[in-house]
Amino acid sequence: MPTLSMIVNGKEVSVEAGAGDLLADVLRDELGLIGTKVSCGEGECGACTVLVDGLSVTSCIYPALKAQGREVTTIEGLPQDGQLHPIQQAFVDVTAPQCGYCIPGMIMSAKALLDENPRPTREKIKEGISGNLCRCTGYYQIVEAIELAAERMAEKGGAR
Amino acid sequence: MWDEYLFPQSVDEALEMLKAHVGNARIMAGGTDLTLQSQRRQVPAKVVVDIARISGLDHVEERDGLIYIGAHVTHAQVAASPLIRSRAGVLAEACGSVGGPQIRNVGTLVGNVVNALPAADGAMALFAMDAEAEVAEGTGRRWTPIASLYAGVGRCTVDSCEAMITQLRVPALRDGEAGAFERLAKRKALILPILNTAVVVGGDGSKIERARIAIGPVATTPFVATEAAAALVGRAPDGAAVAEAAKLASEAAEPRYSLLRGSAEYRKSMVEVLVRRALTRAVARASGEEDENANS
């Protein structure tokens, strides 16, 4: 099997990956990063969203070998020094998660959005998470959480 | 799912890889469609030839009034390109409507064409803009009109097991020309369109001189409403001309009944509404009444 070398959450990793393996499966099954969820398995729901070189992708349909040499960020890569990332903290503070299954993907989409646009309008936030479905339909709090995170990050002078 | 995963460094090497595996190897760009098609066993190829590392396929650039878009350019890159937003706004709008952000970050516009679906948003704008595609096959390359690539639902005349599209080109919109894209769907994102349309009109402000209208999915390939577009030529760019053209477009369109998209009757009447909306916006933009990017 080919060796897949990539940087995951800042660390270089090498794993064996089959030609048809998908990134979500490698992350979860080979690397134990089970924060990334697989829901639809068809790139339709966004639960499996991770960042590849800073761009959000649905890892359930992303060929693992495509990530060769690239930087992958999963939900596990967001906390720093034992502290939740401001986006994660905001989700907790406004009680955005209901069943929670969509939340890692939502947060990764929010991360991609805020990296590109630190002070998005409500409309831009909705666009930013338009590739993520919440089965509990708790979108209101999710949008609110991202707004709150953006505010807090701006106050702190753009914490990552 | 796949037995082998290859990264060619050049277009020639990619074609050699295809040749070496006769019929069993297939070109892949973003893979957002191919991955699922392979999982569902709709595509027999067991060897994927990923074009991600071929240099020279990532360009969006203008030369002599034509905008060139490389085979590895994603929908997100097209939608965000300042060049395309200012000189081919309808294409940026259409590409910005595909799937959700994650799909647009990976899926390519050329891949959208190769999949040859009559509902593809990006393709609709390419039809309205009279795009051409460069095909690399054997040892040569040739340019071919976008329409020549479509042989039916999901059937591209360029076989990804033998050849590849290396780039697209569209004429940059000139002064007095503008386009617009409209889409009807149950939700705003992550959903296939019930209908979509892309239009381009051009004129001198008092008279429409050129028009193209592409509509999907109302036939087995993206449908170009030539009569409706012709009816606009020579007319003043007003509501009456737009309404008449929209009606003709609806009469010419032949949507099928679809469990997913709605009844044929409903969709046929909605063609008129959608084309009217698109033409109204395009005409306003062409006369400078609306900023090209106002809706993006």
Image: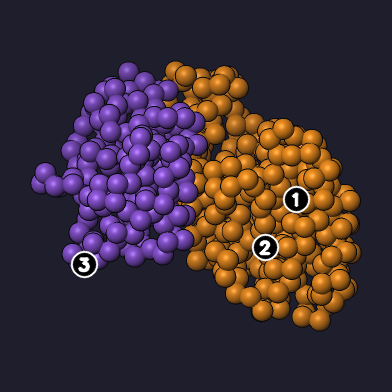
Chain colours: A purple, B orange
Mark 2 falls within which chain? B
Mark 1 residue type = Ile
Helix, strand or loop at label 2? It is strand
| Residue at numbered disc 2 | B180
Q: Most extreme residue toward the left, as rendered? A: A81
Residue B127 seen in render: no
Of the residues under marks 2 and 1, which one precedes in the sequence?
2
Foreground tag (1 vs 3): 3
Helix, strand or loop at label 1? It is strand
Residue B41 seen in render: yes
| Residue at numbered disc 3 | A155
* Residue at 39 percent of width and 29 percent of height: A38
Helix, strand or loop at label 3? It is helix
| Residue at numbered disc 1 | B215
**Image vertical order of residue B257 relative to residue B288, above or below:** above
Residue B86 falls left or right of residue A77: right
* Residue at 59 percent of width and 37 percent of height: B164
Same chain for mark 2 and mark 1? The answer is yes
Mark 3 falls within which chain? A
Mark 3 residue type = Glu
Front residue (pair B213, B161): B213
Q: Residues within 10 Å of mark 1 (few under 14, many from 20)?
A: many
Total of numbered circles in the picture? Answer: 3
Front residue (pair A122, A43): A122
- Looking at the rendered image, the quarter that the N terminus of chain A falls into is top left
Q: Percent from the top left, x then y, of residue B259?
A: 72, 32
Mark 1 falls within which chain? B
Front residue (pair A13, B172): A13
